[in-house]
Image: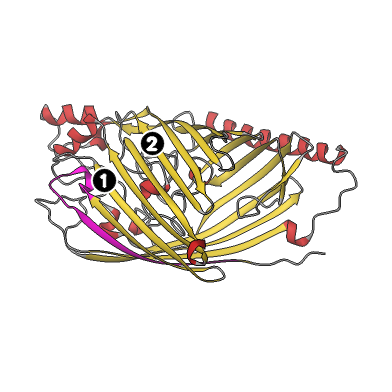
Amino acid sequence: MAADRTLLEWLALLWLCAAGSLFAQSDSPANSGSEPLSLSERFWVSGQANFITQYNPSFPARYSGPNSFGPASDTETSRVLTLFTGVRLAKNTEVLFNVETAGGGGLSLALGIAAFPNLDVVRNPTLGSTPYIARAMVHQVIPLSAQYDDAVRGPLGLASKLPVRRLELRFGKLSTVDFFDLNGVGNDSHLQFMNWAADNNAAFDYAADTRGYTYGLLAEYYDRSFVLRYGEMLMPKVANGLDLEWSITRARARNVELEFHPNLFRNRASTIRLLSFTNVANMGSYREAIHAYLAGKDATPDITAHRRQGRLKSGVGVNLEQTLKDGWRAYARFSWNDGHNESFAYTEADQAFSVGSDLRGSQWRRPQDKLGSAFLADAISGDHRTYLALGGLGFILGDGGLNYGREKIWESYYNLHVWRGAYLGGDVQRVWNPGYNRDRGPATVFSFRFHIEDAVPFGSH
């Protein structure tokens, strides 16, 4: 009941702020006499479809376990289709609703590589392709200044102008990484890199169910030179689980991020994001699982037998984005978490580093084409690696043994604009020490991607 009251308090807070904002809008000189929203400003409908086919040739492996990336050649295709809708109830209040379907599969059932090569893959293939609600949220903007800047309309925000200083509140179903750890170079498996550790900070064990979504409250304060974000999200009941724990006294995720835009180079945009997160959930302890196995209490190391409600996983992340020249950008990410308790929601990484860049095709008269390349390196804690070396299984990794080495990946892609919202992409990834195991690999993954997107045009009055 305490959790239910807290969720109701969140809703009440959101709508009180919304009511206050609407009142402020009606009395504000900047908005007095303003015309009502046009049809094109009020509604949003768009769709996208993303298909990725991946192939890995056979590679050497001294041994394999239940959760290994298979050494035999394999081919798989994944697909994600999304319908985005939204309506602005008032100038600063909107409701966003997305329906999605995901199907196909990942190489080796999306197991055996922490920095897996396809972010579109649903990690539980038994879920099938039945459509589901991906996002359903209320979005409220509270103006704190009379000055407005142009904004880009999209599925997560329908306004074409926003106050320079403002508070934005969101409540409902969403993806944590729709708002935290964003990066213009590495963030979108549909048009950019495909690897999990290129598009997100791999050690950021962000709150999500198996499909990548959760429920929560997000508050963002925007000023001209910085943004401060705070999010409180629901955690899954078990690692990589579909069901969320609705009692936030038992499990929750708290995320705080500071984003600022320093003038490091003249006329070249710079962005720095500093992230902190703390997860509370029914987590297993690597050390307890190791001790129970060595003491003969467990036949095999089993972290699921040593879970306890209320355990913590804390971590930090740094996210950098820099324009080098027109059409050429670079990025870098670093993340770390304590690694004492089990990886729970994203992937099995306790430390991660990635660096890369992208280049638009303007120089060869293909302005909507893009070329990108990145290097990724992930690591796990001492307890985590001992657990895997003794034969323990995580929700992604488990070769039955481990000759530890950092997992390293090089990825390059080319995205070809075909017509309007249609793109073809080619991608290659080289994976050294898959699953942090020097006794396996290196493996190579070749990918072909087809992406199409479009928005419904609404006429203005």
Rendered image coloring scheme? secondary structure
Task: Please state the horizontal and vertical placement of residue 23, each as a whole percent of the image.
Answer: 82, 38
Task: Please state the horizontal and vertical placement of residue 255, each as a whole percent of the image.
Answer: 49, 33
The residue at 64%/38% (across/down) is 169
Task: Please state the horizontal and vertical placement of residue 402, each as a whole percent of the image.
Answer: 14, 41
In which quadrant of the rendered view does residue 385 lie?
top left
- Start-end of magenta stretch: 432-454
Callout 2 amino acid? Phe
Q: Nearer the viewer, residue 267 or 279?
A: 267
Q: Write down the residue under mark 2.
A: 334
The residue at 30%/54% (across/down) is 110
Looking at this view, name the residue that lies furthest to the bottom: 419
Callout 1 amino acid? Lys
The question of residue 337 being in magenta is answered with no
Q: Write down the residue under mark 1.
A: 408
Label 2, residues with CA under 10 Å away: few <14, some 14-19, many ≥20: many
Label 1, residues with CA under 10 Å away: few <14, some 14-19, many ≥20: many
